[in-house]
Each structure stands twice: as C-alpha cells, then as structure tokens.
Image (cartoon, coloured by chain):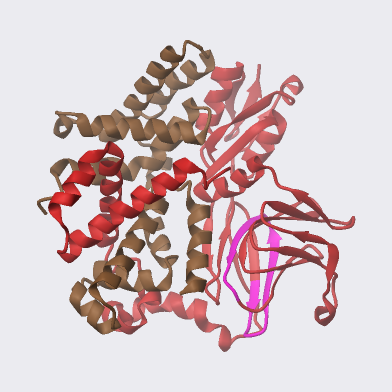
Amino acid sequence: MSIVRPIDIWLAERVLPHERRFHAAALRICRSRDEAEELVQEAYARLLELEGWATIEDPRAYVVRMLRHIAIEKLRRNRIVDFRQFADAEHMTLADDAPDQHRVIAGRDGLRRVSDLIAGLPERCRTVFVRRRIEGESSREIALDLGISQSTYEKRLARAIELLSRAWLGGEEDSADQSEAARRRRRQ
Amino acid sequence: MSIFNHRHRRKRRIAGEAATWLARHDAGTIDEKRFLAWRDASPEHAIAFTRALAVWNEAGARAGVSVESRFTRRRAAAAIGGMALVGLLGAGGFTTRAYAWNSASSKVGECKRVVLPDGSRAMLNTDSELQWRFSSTERSLWIVRGEVGLELVGGSPAQIHGLDRIASLSQGRFNVRLEGAAMDVTVLAGKAAAMRAPKAEALIAAAAAVAAPSEGLLLSAAAPSVREASPQRLAATVAWQQGEILFDNEPLQTAVREYNRYLTGKIVIADPDLTGIPVGGRFTSTDPADFLSALELGLGVRATASNGGFVLTR
C-alpha cells in the first residue's frame, strides 16, 4: 500500500465519514450549496497540509471548527458583515460539541446508505465491485469468469468506485447519479 | 439547480480519475509515478482519491453483512445462507401472490426504504403508508397517507392511486404527497399523467395534464393541473430523503406545520404575530433543536418546552 499515505487513510476513515455533517454545518453559514461545498473542500485541503494531523483527537469537531474559522476569514475579507452569519457560526460549534442520540442514528443511517448505493449501481459495475470487494475474489478470476479483458474489468471497477464515491458522501449529487445510473443501465 | 455546470463536471471528472487510480492500484497495474504526479498536482485530486478510498474501505468493512445476495445470485446461498434470504423472498414473491396488496408504513419521525417486487424503490417519509400490487402486467401503488419518494424501473405502466385520484407514472423518479384532499406528484425524472378514474381498462390520460421533469401534477377535486416545480420545491423533495427539511422564505406557520409532521412533540406558535415571519434554512427533520435555536438567535423567538413539545413566543 505504498502509494496510500497514512494521512489518506486517516482522512478516509476519521474525517470523510462525517462529511454530511460538515455540509450541514457549512450550509448554515453559507449562502449556497456550492459555497458550502467549497468551504468543506477548503477545510480538507488545509487538513492535508497539516503537520500534526495524527494528534487531532476529535477530527470531526476539529473540522467543524475549521469550517467556522475559514468562513469568518472569508467574511472579513469580503468586508460585508452579516451578523446573522456570525451568530450562526458561533452557534454551530456549540451545537456540535457532543454527539447526541440523534446524530448517532444519523451516522448509522449513513453506513446503511453504502449498501443501498451498491444496490443502485449499474449491473455490470455492481457485479465486478461486489465480487471483488465484498466477496474478495481476485481480479483475474473475475475477469476470466466474465470473459472480459483486464482493462474492461478495471474500467467497470473504476466506474463503480466513482459512482459510489460521488453518491456516498455529501449526497447532493444523488439525483444526478441515479438518473445517470438508470441511463447506463438501459444502455448496457 | 444547474447540476451540470462547469464545476460539477470538473468534480465528476476528478472523481472518475481518482476511481481509476484506485481500481488500478487494487489490480496491481498502477503506474506509481504517474499516480503521484496526478495526486500532487492539486489538493482536489488528493481529496478525491481519499474519498474513493473511504468508500472502498466502507464497502469492504461491510463485506457480507448488508450487501446481501440480492445482487450476487450465484454466490448468495453459499455465502450468506438461508437467513438473509427471508427478506428477499418477501420482496420477490409476487408471482405467487400476484393479487394481494402489500403495504408498508412509517411512524412519525421515521423514514423507511422499501424495495418493490420489480426492483423499483420507494421511500416513505414520516407518518406515511404505501400499498402496492404488482404482477407481470400491473404495477399499482396506493398512497394511503403521507409522502412517498418513488424510483421506478422500466416495465408495465405504473399507476399511483391517492384518495380517489389516479396518476400514471413512467419509469423515473417521483415524489408523491397527499395534502388535504389533493395528491401532489412532483416529477424528478420521467413523466406523470393524470388518469380518469375508475374504469381500470379505459384509463386514458387527460390530454393536458402530463407533468415532465421539474414539474408538479396536482390532482384534486378540481381539474388536474400541471405547474412548474420551483428549484426550492425540487430541493425540498430530495432533502427529506436525506433526513433534512428545507425552508426557503416560508411563513413561520408553514415551516412549523411542515416540521410538526416529523415530531411527536409538536411545536405550537403561541403568539399570532409570529405566524407570518419568513424563515429559511436547512435542518435535521427529526431533531428541531437547531431550528429552534436558529429562531431564537435570528428572530428573537423563544421556544419553551411544554407537554413534550415546544411553545413559541416573543
């Protein structure tokens, strides 16, 4: 796993699973979805630059704080001060201090989504993805059995990963993904 | 709602590249130098790659647990055994019970996913009930109460009944909601047409009332009508499926009524002067805490807990 750095794993496992939470928090201090998405993206980019990431105890709370700092930074730069936004930013950290019952449930919901999303993949991609990732067959075995080339196998697997990664986190592209998935299903 | 604008296309392209790298990495065919060059070219690339990695890990961690055999027929029996198949039989058993109505319902505050016999999917919003009857020639759905999101696969024509109204649905995605004496069908993808009830064989689409994507079809005592669904409306119909509730400049009264659908302990507006205040925002549907504190912070409206619910005052 040489190309996958520890920080990648850390980001994938400790930070990204909370992404919907981050988006919700960002949306409350931004004026649009695009802006909120940019804010979250900016926070990730800064995380990747961070030396001491391994010492962060609660990555979720940390990112929420970052979102607030970055948002306030931007507000100051823009020189247009909207008190409502400041008030919300203040309030946001307070609201996110401890995971309450509701959030625990929401989190579990997020996990369940992955299997739903896999179910929604176009069939060819799904077959390859499930056999490789869920059932642990080797790529050679799958390609041979399906009578497809290694490169076709890789393309289908990549397509599955792409669709999942776009739909799983954030969730805001769901509608586009699903209609696209439906379109592909018809074509294949 | 321009999903297909430049930014999104770019994001999509990067997600595709990241996925390709991960697939090659897994297959052992990755060109590491080229990958590293790609990753270092932009933080966006690095983030997209960890995103692909996250979903990859997540799916792997759940191997055999919940991605049941529905999709891997060949190996299903061996891998999972009889237990997991019980649910599948329930969903796939329509050939033997073709003319029975099945039903699913959700409690207040609950959201429920249902896989229909042909693989179509339904999502029940809070306090909703859906019934269905599927055969090789028929797909009938009946919304008894509440709100349902539908994702229909291709097949025989589907009909949704609500109150005594009927709409015919194509393959596509729809949001169907009963409001008072009306059935409101919002089309996200596909087509919805008003039908004349009730002669089942002679159902003919009323010529004018066909709703296309981003349109809503309203079926009530009056003649069926089609209107354009606002982006906010479309966003709201998607939002509830994510456990969120979306207000865009709605009177507080409307917002509270909408919120109360999800709550067993209701919110009551005690001060009539408050009812018309426009409010906006995105909140978690089953937990009003953020909504109430936004009201307090932004509008100076006080929420007092009372009888398991909340009373709003100045």
- Residue A55: give x, y in percent of width and height: 15, 31
Asked if residue B135 is among those painted magenta in the image, a careful observer would answer yes
Image colour for chain B is red
Q: Residue at x 27, y 73 (%)?
A: A131
Of B215 and A136, the residue lying toward us: B215
- Residue B47: give x, y in percent of width and height: 28, 42
- Residue B268: give x, y in percent of width and height: 67, 31
Residue B260 can be seen in this image: no
In the rendered view, tell whether residue B284 sits above or below residue B27: above
In the rendered view, tell whether residue A31 sits above or below residue B138: above
Which segment did they paint magenta?
A: B132-154
Q: Residue at x 84, y 56 (%)?
A: B220
Q: Residue at x 31, y 53 (%)?
A: B17
Asked if residue A173 is among those painted magenta in the image, a careful observer would answer no
In the image, the chain rendered in brown is A
Residue B124 can be seen in this image: yes
